[in-house]
Amino acid sequence: MYWWLRKMRRLWLKFGWIVIIACFAVIVSSFVLVMNGNPIKEKEIGKRLEVDLEREYKTKFDLEYTRYDATRSEYGAIFHTDEPDKKDNVSFYATYHNDNELYDTYREEIWSRDIRKALSNEAKEVFGNNFIRVEVNSPPELSLDDVKLNNLMRYTELSEASMQHVEIMVNVHKEARHTVEKDLAKLVTKMKDGSMKAGKVIVMGADDEKATAFRSWVWIDVTNLPKDFKMSEFNKLLEWDKTFTAIK
């Protein structure tokens, strides 16, 4: 009995460090897999997503990179379009819900891009050189009425219910602050006749690198705004922060 214990002790002293290292390696590998996912599965899902997306939308996409979301235990990938004009390219996320249900943000990114382009043209006409850029903070969301349209790609064809939660920020230079209310009224008029039939628009004071910045905004929900709204009634519809704050 004692000789067996002595033998085991000698074996442990000789090879025990190997067991400890192996156990440590298993623990580290398990942690890495939990945090970063399985790279083989991640690559396989990226290829599968590419095939399913191109079948769904009947267009070619380029895979930028795959990713694993440890908080959701979810494999996904970032793709981008290949438009004739490279400035029109958009990047979007795709994954599977419940292992086989395709989910992606392709349509939302296309809608956001087209809204930015349309509203930028209108904002340039109104704000001139004081215009900086348009940002779509919240893209359209398919309402129940629009779900049946499936692969609808033009945001102008969406129902008002799908458009009402859209939030758009128009960035302008500080020189525009003195006429921002009047200019917003002009912009909303153009939007109602052109780019947007619903949603919220925010005019945000911004700046270039050479001048003192200010931060203030006017925003209005155009969803229920009649086309022929009167200028005298416009101020009642505004939420207006009149505090201009210098930012050093």
Image (cartoon, rainbow, N blue to C red):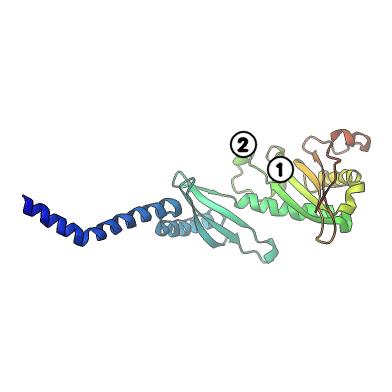
Mark 2 — residue? 144
At label 2, counting other C-alpha atoms closer than 10 Å, the crowd grade (few under 14, some 14-19, many 20 or more) is few
Residue sitting at x 8%, y 53%: 4
Where on the picture, by quarter, is residue 57?
Answer: bottom right
Question: Quick check: marks 1 and 2 in contact, CB under 8 Å?
Answer: no
Considering depth in this image, is 46 or 152 the residue closer to the camera? 46
Residue sitting at x 68%, y 50%: 111
Q: Secondary structure at mark 2?
A: helix
Q: Residue 77 location, x and y as percent?
A: 52, 56
Q: Who comes first in sequence, dot 1 or dot 2?
A: 2
Q: Quadrant of the C terminus?
A: bottom right
| Mark 1 → mark 2, Cα distance in angstroms | 16 Å
* In the image, farthest residue toward the right: 232
Q: Position of residue 216 (x, y in %)?
A: 82, 45
- Residue 226 is left or right of residue 48, and the answer is right
Q: Is residue 25 left or right of residue 205?
A: left
- Image height of 234 relative to 56, above or below: above
Residue 166: mark: 1
Q: Position of residue 48 (x, y in %)?
A: 46, 57
